[in-house]
Amino acid sequence: MCEMGYDVIVAGGGPAGMMAAIAAAENGARVCLLEPNERLGKKLNITGKGRCNVTNNCGAEELQGKMCCNGKFLYSAFSQYDPSDVMRFFEDHGVPLKTERGNRVFPVSDRSFDISAALEKYLRTLGVELARDRVEALWLEDGALRGAVCRGGRREARRVVVATGGMSYPLTGSTGDGYRLARSAGHTVTELRGSLVPLCAAGTLCQRLQGLSLRNVTLRAYEEDKLIYQELGEMLFTHFGVSGPLVLSASAHMRRFGQRRYRLEIDLKPALDPEALDKRLLSDFQRRQNSDLINALDDLLPRKLIEPFVDLTGIPPRQKVHDLTREQRQGILGLLKALPVEITGPRPVEEAIVTAGGVSVKEVNPSTMESRLLPGLYFAGEVLDVDAYTGGFNLQIAWSTGRLAGTSAARAAWSD
């Protein structure tokens, strides 16, 4: 079976694919959007813990600064469709938005389904054909692109946009199909790894602290002895290591596991410099001078952290506070300002929020998102070798590259 008559086929019904299909249809193209899941935006609906961090309400300079790699490649896409355009799009389509801490943008309803529903409603309004089908291969004849080979048969089209996502959260359909399609067209796929991913830790500290969430701490990450990340926020201890917003952001800077050693330091009292914290310790210990050390830290630390913390100091838990030496107090001070966590590696890419690596941007035209190797083939979203830090920046990549790919594909199809 061969389905005829499309100007643009879009493979993938995630944020990049839906935006690509919308842009193509707005530019007059006959569009077919292919998505194997029972509904569009399956991964989109679980982002931001189900709230959907749509974008980040920031300017161009900050947006570029939040890219982990190949930020320059995205300059054209961002300049044509920036966060303010994304916010305007959703509010124009009936989804009021709000800006929270860190300029993160969410639907006022805190429901990610409102975002995917608005996109799907507009796709139907535009007359985009929504087909529950998977692209198995690119349809090539004599080296030229003719369309896509799907499970349901061949679908002919002048242009094909690959927006199938990465390899993270495979249960949502991100199974790496786009990389296989890209390779079949001769494209290079750079090393794939998890970014914005929980981290595994050595020793038993994290296991002992499993379930403990720390707020308003500063996390520092080191590659060997070089500081590569520092931020104030929240984190979580788990049975395997550490997770939470700070850890996910830090992981984006850790790109050479197996070649470099990584460690974290947690400043448990970032509001106090060492001198002020030492005065605080002296004051607390003066009030609790007849207490055992294990019973004298309640005002400084969460209860679950006290026993592991004291073990790290090397001081006997039952040593009286009035017997502490200056050196012992300085050791406590040092741990409060730099609790160490040795990192052994990331969790599997399947547990990552986004996939780092992908289709080499050297082989894609940044002004159109069209392949430099196979005319008529376009890429958008996570399938490309681009990723960013947390805060709505990765979704902005999806919206911007999807918009540019869909617009470019439609205009090129009409110029044939």
Image (tube, rainbow, N blue to C red):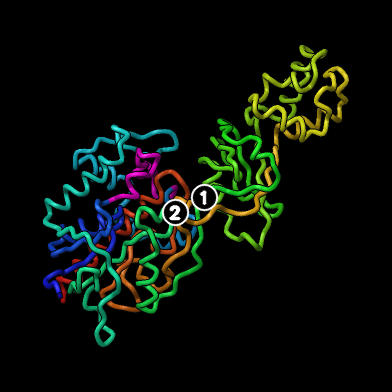
Residue that mark 1 sits on: 197
Left or right of residue 276: residue 407: left
Q: Residue lying farthest bottom?
A: 142
> Per the image, is 56 magenta?
yes
- Assess whether mark 1 and mark 2 are in contact (beta carbons under 8 angstroms): no
Query: Which type of secondary structure does the marked residue at label 2 adopt?
Result: strand
Check the picture and name the quadrant holding the C terminus: bottom left
**Element marked by disc 1:** loop
Q: CA distance from mark 2 to mark 1?
A: 8 Å
Of residue 350 and residue 9, the one placed in the foreground of this image is: 350
Residue sitting at 72 percent across and 28 percent down? 307
Vertical order, 25 against 147 (above or below): above
Closer to the N terminus: mark 2 or mark 1?
1
Viewer-proximal residue, 62 or 140? 140
The structure residue drawn at horizontal position 74% and vertical position 19%, both measured from the top left corner, is 295
Q: Report the span colored magenta.
A: 41-62
Q: Which x, y percent locates residue 308?
A: 72, 32
Q: Is residue 408 left or right of residue 235?
A: left
Q: Quadrant of the N terminus?
A: bottom left
Q: For residue 354, which numbered disc appears in the image?
A: 2
Q: Residues within 10 Å of mark 2 (few under 14, many from 20)?
A: many
Side of 132 relative to 76 (left or right): left
Q: Is residue 357 above or below residue 296?
A: below
Q: Is residue 225 above or below residue 190?
A: above
* Residue closer to the observer: 302 or 390: 302
Q: Position of residue 173 (x, y in %)?
A: 35, 57
The residue closer to the viewer here, 331 or 231, is 331
Q: Is 149 above or below relative to 163? A: below
Q: Amino acid at mark 2?
A: Val
Task: Tell me residue 223's x, y (percent).
Answer: 66, 54
Q: Residues within 10 Å of mark 1 (few under 14, many from 20)?
A: many
Q: Quadrant of residue 25?
A: bottom left
